Image (cartoon, rainbow, N blue to C red):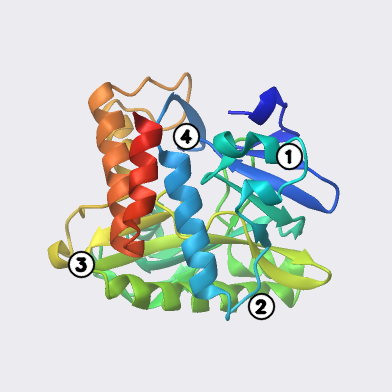
Amino acid sequence: MSPLSITPDQSGKVRDLYDLGDRMIIVTTDRISAFDVILPNRIPGKGIVLNALTMFWMKELRDLVPNHILSDDPTDFPAPFAEANRELRHRSVLVRKAEIFPFECVVRGYLTGSGWKDYRREGAVSGVPLPGGLVLSQKLAEPIFTPTTKSNEGHDRPVSFEEMRTSLGQEASVLRDLALALYRRASKIAAKRGILIADTKFEFGRIDGVITLIDEVLTPDSSRFWKADRYRPGEPQESYDKQYVREYLLSLHYQGDGEPPTLPDDVVSRTAVLYREILEILTGDTSALDIVEQSSS
């Protein structure tokens, strides 16, 4: 969606960006991507869920690192965006523009996804050696930092911490330590609500020379959320995140090459339910759920 038919200055896989000079408006759409490809479908209410969760986590984590958000109330936005209050409410933020670090700061607390594939092949993940004999979904002794390159188009590429440090110098260590601290704090909060955070990714930038948390934070697009009471090492886990869509695509032998398939209605509906449920579990915000329902009707 574009408010008032204004063309975004930049469109990512899920977000539309509007450049205001030293500030920016980020609109989170209902688009969904998998394997770094935008799928043909929209997931009803998804953008609202992502926006609400990001706001929740930014507030919970702001004592660890500053963030770039100025307001999530469209009436605070400049014209003509303020006049698009109805279209933008609950799915947009006004932020300070940052000089973005060209890496995604991935933290893994459990062995799954591409990390599991790397471990089986190499006994390590992004250059981090792990003990032998680990199984799928196993909790790691300590969370590990496994960065990737950041790409708005195409595939992100895993890199070692040493590669990241060659590019960024000492700031690489600061980003690593921040990402691990954020993951540990969020994991404690989620655990109280019966959720395990298997892995997640953070993005950072500089604002006035200060390292700042930006973009989405701990959403089902950027994280794997598992049910703690059904956690079983050695098995795939029940999750509240995009993994459900990935599994459907894998059943079609699609991993990002060629034209992406259209998701059937039942996969779209189930994905929407999973996103709404994790919002309720983590935030307890039933009013936000009502908003999602209204946007889906």
Q: Residues within 10 Å of mark 1 (few under 14, many from 20)?
A: many
- The amino acid type of the residue labelled 1 equals Tyr
User: Does label 2 or label 4 sit earlier along the sequence?
Assistant: 4
Indicate the quadrant where residue 166 lies: bottom right
Instruction: Between label 2 and label 1, give the one nearer the viewer.
Output: 1
Camera sees residue 242: no
Q: Which residue is under mark 2? A: 174
Q: Are marks 3 and 4 in contact (CB under 8 Å)?
A: no
In the figure, is residue 22 to the left or right of 181? Answer: right
Crowdedness near tag 4: few (<14), some (14–19) or many (≥20) residues, C-alpha within 10 Å: many
Disc nearest the viewer among 3 and 4: 4
User: What's the CA distance linking mark 4 and mark 1?
Assistant: 17 Å
> Would you place residue 163 above or below residue 271 in this image?
below
Q: Residue at x 72, y 71 (%)?
A: 211
Which mark, by number, is residue 30?
A: 4
For marks 2 and 1, the one nearer the N-term is 1
Mark 2–mark 4 distance (CA, rounded to whole Å): 33 Å
157 and 130: which is toward the camera: 157
Amino acid type shown at disc 2: Val
Position in image of residue 147 (x %, y %): 56, 61
Gap in Å between the C-alphas at discs 3 and 2? 30 Å
Residue lying at 39% horizontally and 57% vertically, measured from the top left: 115
* Rendered location of residue 31, percent (x, y): 48, 32
Q: Earlier in the sequence, mark 4 or mark 1?
A: 1
Determine the CA span between mark 3 and mark 4.
28 Å
Any part of residue 195 in sight: yes
* Mark identifier at residue 228: 3
